[in-house]
Image (cartoon, grey):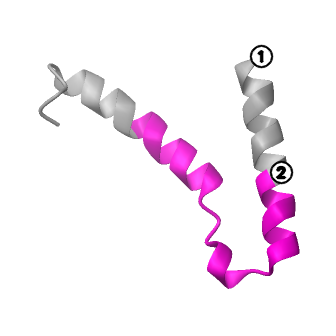
Amino acid sequence: MLRFRQMKSLQKFASVHANVHNHFNSECHLIDRQTYRTRRSAALAEWQNLMV
């Protein structure tokens, strides 16, 4: 928090970080490997579409 000069910047970063973390964090220890890979591939493809 000390690196952010304004609270608004911190809030904006935290909001984006939370959304990205929730999108990519799929708790792989609870699902089988093939399902995990399929979900990761889909998430990565969606992320790459957003970056274009």
- Look at the image and give the residue range highlighted in magenta: 15-40
Secondary structure at badge 1 equals loop
Secondary structure at badge 2 equals helix
Most frequent secondary structure within the magenta stretch: helix
- Residue of label 1: 52
- Inspect the image, locate mark 2, and give the three-letter code of the amino acid beneath it: Ser
Q: Position of residue 49 (x, y in %)?
A: 80, 27
Query: How many marks do you count on the picture?
Result: 2
The residue at the point 17 percent across, 20 percent down is 6
In the image: residue 19, left or right of residue 36: left
Q: Quadrant of residue 11?
A: top left
Q: Quadrant of residue 29?
A: bottom right
- Residue of label 2: 41
Q: Position of residue 8 (x, y in %)?
A: 25, 23
In the image: residue 9, left or right of residue 51: left
Q: Quadrant of residue 35?
A: bottom right
The residue at the point 14 percent across, 19 percent down is 5
Q: Position of residue 14 (x, y in %)?
A: 36, 39
Q: Quick one: label 1 or label 2, which is nearer the N terminus?
A: 2
Tag of residue 16? none
Mark 1, Cα crowd under 10 Å, few <14 / some 14-19 / many 20+, is few
Mark 2, Cα crowd under 10 Å, few <14 / some 14-19 / many 20+, is few
- Inspect the image, locate mark 1, and give the three-letter code of the amino acid beneath it: Val
Magenta highlight on residue 32: yes
Instruction: Using the numbered discs, state the Cα–Cα distance from disc 1 to disc 2 in whole angstroms.
Output: 17 Å
Quarter occupied by the C terminus: top right
Q: In this rendering, is residue 41 above or below 10?
A: below
Residue closest to the eye, 16 or 51: 51
